[in-house]
Each structure stands twice: as C-alpha cells, then as structure tokens.
Image: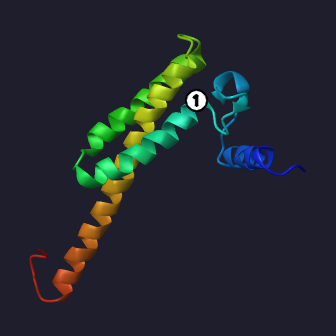
Amino acid sequence: MRKGPYALWLYLMKLGASAGCHQRPDRSFFFHGWQFPVCARCTGVLAGQLVGIPIAIKKNISTLTAVLCCETTMLDWSLQYSGVKKSTNKRRLVTGLLGGFGLAVIYVNIIRFVIKKIRRSENVRNGDKNGT
C-alpha cells in the first residue's frame, strides 16, 4: 500500500465506516477529488458536536432546545425516507449540524446532572442535611 495522502484517506474512510456511516458518494462531499470519510449528515453531526460542546459548557442551554435541534435531523431524515421531500447534501449538513449541536448539549447536561448528584451526596455524607 502506498504511503502518504492515500493511506491517510483510506484510514479515515475505514474510521468513518466503523462509526456507522454509509459513506454513499452521492450523499458525501468531496475535496480536491477526495471523498469525505463520512456523509454530509454525519459531517454536520460531527461539526455540530465539536462546536456544541464548548458552547454548551459556557452557556446553560435547555435540554428541550437540544431535543428540538435533534428533531430537525430526524424530520429531514423522515421526509427523505418516506419520499415526501428529497433531501440535499446542503440540507443534510445543516440539519446534521443542528442534531450534533443538540447531542452535545444533551451530553453536557447529563454530565452536569451527574456532577450535581455526586456533590449533593457528598454534602449529605458530610453532614449537610439539605444536600446543598
């Protein structure tokens, strides 16, 4: 096997496939002739998570908002799957961004919840009956 860009691309393609992406060329972006290792929607989800985690850490975003962001991805997929409306790579990217952002917020909110529970139980153990 050749070393260099091809080896890296092949590695990334295997990584994308192992993550569960279908990697269909017609639903993927290309850069200088190289197919992205994940489809347009998965590209959006990954980018949304990368952007969403630091934003969710800095700002307290509600879980309801996060779920609504995730629902846009599901709605686009459902409309496409049912044949009601054909999706485009641009729409897949945008709804993937929203879905990834929503997932990131949910991850951060779950971690915050667990940390809060741990702190409360430690406070109760240390004699604070209110757990605050």
Under circle 1, the secondary element is helix
Which is more toward the observer, 5 or 82?
5
Circle 1 residues within 10 Å: few <14, some 14–19, many ≥20: many
33 with respect to 52 (left or right): right
Residue 8 at what x, y percent from top left?
74, 49
Q: The residue under label 1 is which amino acid type?
A: Ala
Scheme of image coloration? rainbow
Q: Quadrant of the C terminus?
A: bottom left
Residue 113 falls in which quadrant of the image? bottom left
* Horizontal side, residue 41 vs residue 102: left or right: right
From the viewer's perspective, is residue 61 above or below residue 119?
A: above
Looking at the rendered structure, the number of numbered marks drawn on it comes to 1
Q: Mark 1 points at which residue?
A: 40
Residue at screen point 38% across, 41% down: 102
Front position in the image: 40 or 83: 40
Image spot of residue 90 (x, y percent): 52, 20
Q: Can residue 127 be seen in this view?
A: yes
On the image, the x and y values in percent for residue 131 come to: 14, 76
The outermost residue toward the right is 1
Q: Is residue 81 above or below residue 57?
A: above
Toward which corner of the image does residue 67 lie, by quadrant?
top left
Where residue 10 sits in the image (x, y, percent)?
78, 45
Left or right side of 129 for 65? right
Q: Which residue is drawn at 51% across and 17% down?
A: 79
Q: Residue at x 23, y 75 (%)?
A: 119
Q: In which quarter of the image is residue 29?
A: top right
Question: Is residue 74 visible from the viewing direction of this image?
Answer: no
